[in-house]
Image: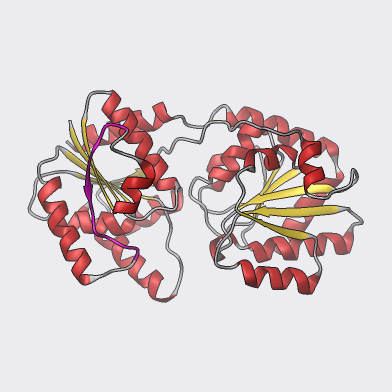
Amino acid sequence: MRIALVMGTSAGGTGRHVHDLVHGLVGAGHDVVVLAPAGELDQFDFAGAGAATVELTVRDRPQPRGDARALATLREVCGGADVVHAHGARVGALATLALVGVATPLVVTIHNASPGGGFAGRVHAVLERVVARGADLVLGVSADIVKDQLRLDAKRSELAVIAAPPPAAVTRDRYAVRRDLGMDARTMLLVTVARLAPQKDLDLLIDAVAEMLGRHDIAVLAAVAGDGPDRERLQLRIDDTRVPVRLLGHRTDVADLIAAADAVVSTARWEGQPVGLQEALHSGAAIVATDAGGTGAVVGDAAILVPVGDVASMARALADVLLHGAVRDDLRSRAIGRGAELPTSADALEAALTAYRSVL
């Protein structure tokens, strides 16, 4: 098959998924062309994986001139493909418009839910509607995205299969990690891997730790690996409340942190197929998470799930894990089993090929 893969700007997850698909598709003998912004073509080295590449002038927000050039490029390149697979609502909508009147079938994977209200939310809603009405098949990384697409009268919408990251190598033992964090032997460690942005709701972590400590005498440090636009605001909150939450910034030793944790915590308002929790499952970590988006589908029964934004429930769950070794041990055992069930690159490739054949 001649397959055109289209993506916009990516912080990592979408680009890694597309790179995996390129590697698998080329290895299976298919002709692949990737259309993406110049930065993403360089960052993910699709050419090195065997694909032809075409620069696509598209940014996060609508830009009339750039989008007009992107439409022309998509129409020229994708019209000669057997199938087009766009990744993201924005490039999915552009591909939909570019292929009007063209017989080439279009598959779109939506990797993120709506950002909520405001201008960005209104734009995303329009993009989702365009994709629903124009794509031959819409894949969503979580069940709520699939449900929304069906509500918008998509021809077909199904769950996407995204490969989990392979288990990462741990380079230091838990005692070395804790020593580097300045922890003593009796202090327990919570680890969160998250971008410091509203979607991750790290205010919930701060509030839940504060409430837990108001009820229980627990020596604890909550360490957050990641950076983002909310860092200054969150640090001010932490300083004001004196809650033992530490923002570590960007880290290259996430696997070491997860392996050293007494529990791994996610407080997100929405997730698709969260990479950090997949890494925690591979590591056999005790997990406490909000039941947000696709989180429950990823962790199965290998986590304590609490309602999104519920401070009291999160505080109770954290206390339960930290105070009771039997609870931690049970969650760790379940995590190892669940980690072995996560989809691989081969699973994602087979799912993509099945999707392509279904629309041809």
Image check: 128 left or right of 189?
left
In this rendering, is residue 343 above or below 87?
above
Image check: 145 left or right of 294?
left
**Residue in the foreground of this view, choosing between 125 and 248:** 248
Q: Is residue 239 magenta?
A: no
Identify the magenta region. Answer: 49-60
For image coordinates 43% across by 76% down, the residue present is 118
Image check: 3 left or right of 100?
right
The image shows residue 294 at horizontal and vertical percentages of 51, 48
The quadrant in which the C terminus is found is top left
Give the residue at the far left of this rendering: 101
For image coordinates 41% across by 41% down, the residue present is 16
**Residue in the foreground of this view, choosing between 53 and 238:** 53
Q: Main secondary structure of the magenta part?
A: loop
The image quadrant of residue 208 is bottom right
The image shows residue 226 at horizontal and vertical percentages of 60, 55
- Colour theme: secondary structure
For image coordinates 39% across by 53% down, the residue present is 10
Give the residue at the far top of this rendering: 28
The image quadrant of residue 333 is top right
For image coordinates 28% across by 37% down, the residue present is 47
Residue 162 visible in the displayed image: yes
